[in-house]
Image (cartoon, helix red, strand yellow):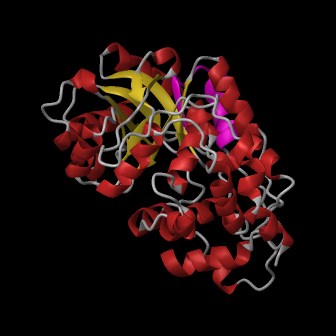
Amino acid sequence: MDPHRRKLLRLGAAVGAGLVGRRAAAAAGDGGTPPRIGRSVTLGRTGLRVSEIGFGSASSSDPALVRHALDRGVTFFDTAESYRGGSRAEAAIGAALQGVPRDRYVLASKTRAGARETAAQMMQALEGSLKSLRTDYLDIYFNHAVNNVDRLRNHHWAEFTERATAQGKIRFRGVSGHGSRLVECLDFALDHDLADVVLAAYSFALDPDFSDRLRHTFHFVAMQPGLPRVLDKAKANNVGVVAMKTLMGARLNDVREHETEGRTFAQAALRWVLESPRVDAAVISMKTLDQIDEFVGASRHAGAQPQDLPLLARYAYRQNARWCRPGCDGCAGACPHGVEIAEVLRTRMYAVDYGDEALARNDYAALGEGASPCVTCRHEACRGACPFGLSIAALTRDTANRLA
C-alpha cells in the first residue's frame, strides 16, 4: 500500500483529538428537526447582518430553491446579471422574494465592469439587475470576476458606484474574483478603497493552516501565500470578506462513501472556512433542496468536528493532482501560443466538477481562441509548468474538445 495512503487512513486517530474549533459547536438537534442557519455575522464596516452561509445562484434559476433556503434561515442571496444567461438567476430570486419584507434579507448582484466601460453603461447594467430582481436597491454590488487590474483602474467604476450609492440604488460596493490575478486585483481594490466587501475564492485547501497540519501525512502544498495575506489585509481594513469556491472543486461524490450521517464533506469544508478568522461568511451554489439542507447543516453544527480534518484530507489527497488552484498562475506565460491556461482550466472545472455545461461554455467562449492550439500541439512547452504537477497539456486539450 502507498505509504501516503496508509498515513491518510490513520489520520483520524492521529489528529481527531487535537482538532478543536474556534467557536463552540451548535447543538445537533434530533433527527427530525430540519436544518437551519445557526448564526448570523456582520460583513465588516457595512454593518450588514447576514446568514453565515449564503445562497449562490450561479447554477440555479428556480424560485422554489430560493424560498426553501429562506425557510431554512438563509438571509444572504448572491447573484449576477450573467448567471444562467439572460438574467434568469436574478429573475428567479426576484420572483421568490416578492412579498418578503426587504429588511429580512441581504441582496447582492454583480456586473463585469470593463476597463473602457462608461459610468452610463454601468448604470444601465445596474438598472437591469434591479428590474430583474424587482427591488429598488441592492445591498452590495460587485465588480464581477475581476482578473485584470485595468478594470479597477477605470475611474468610472468609482464614480458610478458613488453616484448609485447617493441615489439609493446600492448601499455598498465590492469586488469579486477567483482568477489567476486575484491577489493583485484585491490588493489594488483595498489600496484604493474600492471595496466595502470582497468575494473571493477561498477553501480549506487554500488555507496554509490546513497544509501545515498535513505536512507529515502527504505532500500537500497550499497555493501562493498572497491570498491569506490579502484577506488579512481586508479584515484589517474592516472590509467584509465572503468566501466562494469553498469545496476545492466540489467533486462531492468522491468521498461520499466515507461520510457519516450529519457529517458530510461539504459540511466539513464549509465549517473549516467559517472557522477562519479571515472570513465572515460563505456563499455556495445551491442546486437542489437536499443540497440546501446539507449546506445549511454546516451552520447548524457550527464549529469544527473531530471527523472534519480526516475527511478533508482524504478528499485533498484524491484531488491534489487534478485541481487547478485559484489564484496560483504558476503556469503564466508557459504557452508560446498564448493560451490562458489557468482561465481555460477554470472553465473545465465548471463543466467537469460542477456539472454546469452552460456556464462552462459561456466562460470558455469569452476566452476567444481558448485552448484550440492545444488540440494539435506537439511540443507541449507547458510540461512541468504547474508547480503542483498538473498535466496541463492533457487538461487543456480535454477542455478544448469538450467546450470548443
Tell me where the magenta segment starts and ends, as one range: 182-201
Residue at figure coordinates x 26%, y 52% from the top left: 88
Instruction: In the displayed orientation, state which residue is furthest to the left.
Output: 99
**Residue 383, visible in the rendered structure:** yes
Left or right, residue 389 beside residue 182: right
Q: How many marks?
A: 0
**310 lies left or right of 346:** right
Q: Measured from the top left, where is residue 239 in percent x and y?
A: 57, 21
Image-based side of 45 in relation to 208, left or right: left
Q: Quadrant of the N terminus?
A: bottom right
**Which corner quadrant of the image does residue 317 belong to?**
bottom right
Q: Residue at x 50, y 63 (%)?
A: 350
In the image, is residue 193 part of the stretch drawn in magenta?
yes
Please state which of residues 89 and 188 is positioned toward the viewer in this rendering.
89
Spot occupied by residue 134 in the image (x, y as percentages of width and height): 19, 35
- Seen in the picture, residue 386 relative to 289 is either above or below; the reply is below
Residue 246 image point, x, y percent: 56, 48
User: Where residue 180 sits: x, y (%)?
Assistant: 67, 50
Q: Is residue 352 magenta?
A: no
Q: Which residue sits at x=67%, y=86%?
A: 376
Q: Is residue 201 visible?
A: no
Residue 338 to residue 61: above or below: below
- In the displayed structure, does residue 256 sit left or right of residue 162? right
